[in-house]
């Protein structure tokens, strides 16, 4: 089956053609570990995990590399201001190294709770300083780098393709590439730091010697150096959140391609943001943001959040509300209830393999292959589990294979509600949808029909619940 992915660079869906037949090299920008990751960050990692799992589901051997930004990400996108790690260290009275260790561990706790698979290669930026220095030296030899008072910079005017990822002409890209307080010494506003010098007299906790003087790498050079080290000069797929298009990924492309003369990544995938109604964009600096831990403390299964993320396409903005999370929690529980019921019916044994020719399995696979259409894939799974023409063992096999792609722990026992047979569960789900669409006539009819079959539904502030009428 042909996999099609929306490529930000081409601004359209394209058939995925890997560099090596049957393989996919994927680089995903990792967290900046100066504070907890919020659930907005985690939406991007869930989308990327969905990509990796979908590639494997479709038969690709995947090598996924993720970095940890533990140095060099400055408070402003324009290479000004403090290093976020040093800010974290001062805030908590710890060393920058301790901050990095602490928040890296916190990140992976959440990451694993969301069933995201560990990357094949995980690279903390501080362990790749040599590769970064080598890359900057290459750029310097080729005439793309210049020195000013506070560091070595990339000259964007020397790279005619600059700004292409964001759909800007070269000159527009140069003007807009950096939303910055201008550094008067830079040749162009969008020029960016490859290597920053420690300020005279400054005692930075993280600094290294280099051919240009003591200092630390720029944030963008980190990803270029680590991606090329582990995946080669040209990589198949590079991902991140939408905020990275205009600056971070634009700069990664410029410096990598200037150094090698080859395309840096063939496919660029970007996930849209999670937003909250009142505060708009969720950000680490805004304070009062939500973490996976907060969801857990409130009694939610983190995978309910994963389900919520998959209920919207990754290229659509998703608004977080507690009602939506409640609905996702119930729906996931219902799905697990269906699987538990099928397990009982099948005496616990799934068929060896799902019927790949069945209409719902084909729809499931096609949805994944169509630019990771998770909402469609979930709909196909629901249909497959309630289809009248397949037995419980076959349906269980479908659920098992689908769950390898979805990572929703569908075989976990449902949490709170009575397990219903699939046809009743389907009616419950139809009623939930009717209510969501405010079709109250239909939802009332379904409530009555369910009651006749011995199921009582109830609408609570936390969403719809059901139980077997005694
Ligand atoms: P950071 O740790 O700030 O470097 O961000 C980690 C990842 O989260 C990046 O890929 C960002 O693009 C992404 N990201 C940041 N904020 C959001 C958000 N509100 N929704 C989705 N992804 C986000
Ligand atoms: Zn990056």
Image (cartoon, rainbow, N blue to C red):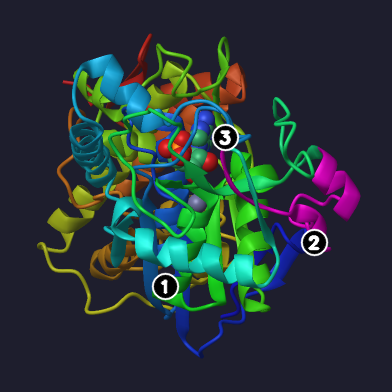
Res 229 label: 1
> Which element carries disc 1, helix, strand or loop?
helix
The answer to whether the residue labelled 2 contacts the one labelled 3, judged by CB atoms less than 8 Å apart, is no
Residue beneath disc 2: 158
Residue lying farthest to the left in this orientation: 347
Which image quarter holds the N terminus?
bottom right
Residue beneath disc 3: 273
User: What is the span of residues highlighted in magenta in the rendered image?
Assistant: 150-175
**Horizontal and vertical percent for residue 318?**
57, 32
Which image quarter holds the C terminus?
top left
Residue lying farthest to the front in this orientation: 201
Instruction: Judge: label 3 CB < 8 Å from ligand 1.
Output: yes
N-term mark: 2 or 3: 2
CA neighbours of label 2 inside 10 A, class few (<14), some (14 to 19), many (20+): few
Of 354 and 215, the residue lying toward us:
215
**Horizontal and vertical percent for residue 298?**
24, 16
């Amino acid at each position: 089956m042909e996999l099609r992915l929306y490529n930000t660079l081409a601004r359209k869906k394209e058939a995925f053609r890997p560099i090596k037949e049957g393989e996919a090299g994927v680089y995903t920008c990792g967290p900046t570990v100066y504070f907890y990751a919020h659930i907005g960050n985690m939406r991007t990692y869930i989308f990327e995990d969905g990509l990796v799992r979908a590639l494997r589901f479709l038969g690709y051997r995947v090598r996924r590399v993720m970095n940890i930004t533990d140095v060099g990400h400055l408070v402003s996108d324009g290479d000004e201001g403090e290093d976020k790690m040093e800010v974290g260290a001062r805030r908590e009275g710890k060393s920058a190294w301790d901050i990095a260790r602490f928040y890296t561990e916190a990140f992976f706790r959440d990451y694993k709770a969301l069933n995201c698979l560990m990357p094949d290669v995980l690279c903390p930026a501080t362990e790749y300083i040599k590769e970064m220095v080598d890359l900057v030296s290459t750029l310097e030899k080729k005439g793309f780098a210049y020195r000013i008072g506070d560091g070595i910079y990339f000259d964007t005017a020397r790279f005619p393709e600059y700004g292409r990822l964001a759909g800007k002409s070269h000159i527009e890209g140069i003007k807009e590439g950096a939303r910055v307080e201008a550094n008067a010494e830079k040749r162009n506003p969008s020029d960016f730091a490859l290597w920053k010098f420690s300020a005279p007299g400054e005692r930075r906790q993280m600094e290294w010697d280099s051919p240009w003087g003591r200092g630390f790498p720029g944030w963008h050079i980190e990803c270029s150096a680590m991606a090329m080290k582990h995946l080669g000069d040209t990589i198949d797929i590079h991902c991140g959140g939408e905020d990275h298009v205009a600056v971070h990924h634009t700069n990664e492309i410029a410096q990598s391609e200037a150094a090698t003369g080859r395309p840096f990544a063939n496919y660029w995938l970007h996930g849209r943001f999670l937003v909250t109604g009142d505060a708009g964009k969720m950000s680490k600096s805004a304070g009062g943001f939500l973490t996976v831990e907060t969801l857990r403390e409130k009694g939610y299964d983190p995978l309910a959040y994963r389900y919520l993320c998959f209920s919207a396409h990754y290229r659509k903005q998703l608004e977080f509300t507690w009602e939506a999370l409640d609905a996702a929690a119930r729906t996931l529980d219902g799905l697990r209830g269906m699987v538990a019921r099928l397990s009982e019916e099948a005496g616990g044994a799934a068929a060896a393999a799902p019927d790949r020719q069945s209409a719902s399995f084909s729809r499931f696979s096609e949805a994944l292959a169509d630019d990771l259409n998770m909402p469609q894939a979930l709909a196909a799974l629901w249909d497959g589990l309630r289809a009248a023409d397949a037995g419980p063992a076959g349906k269980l096999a479908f659920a098992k294979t689908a769950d390898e792609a979805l990572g929703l722990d569908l075989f976990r026992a449902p949490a709170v509600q009575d397990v219903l047979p699939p046809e009743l569960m389907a009616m419950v789900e139809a009623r939930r949808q009717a209510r969501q669409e405010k079709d109250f006539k239909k939802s009332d009819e379904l409530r009555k029909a369910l009651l006749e079959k011995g199921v009582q539904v109830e609408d609570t502030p936390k969403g719809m619940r059901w139980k077997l009428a005694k």
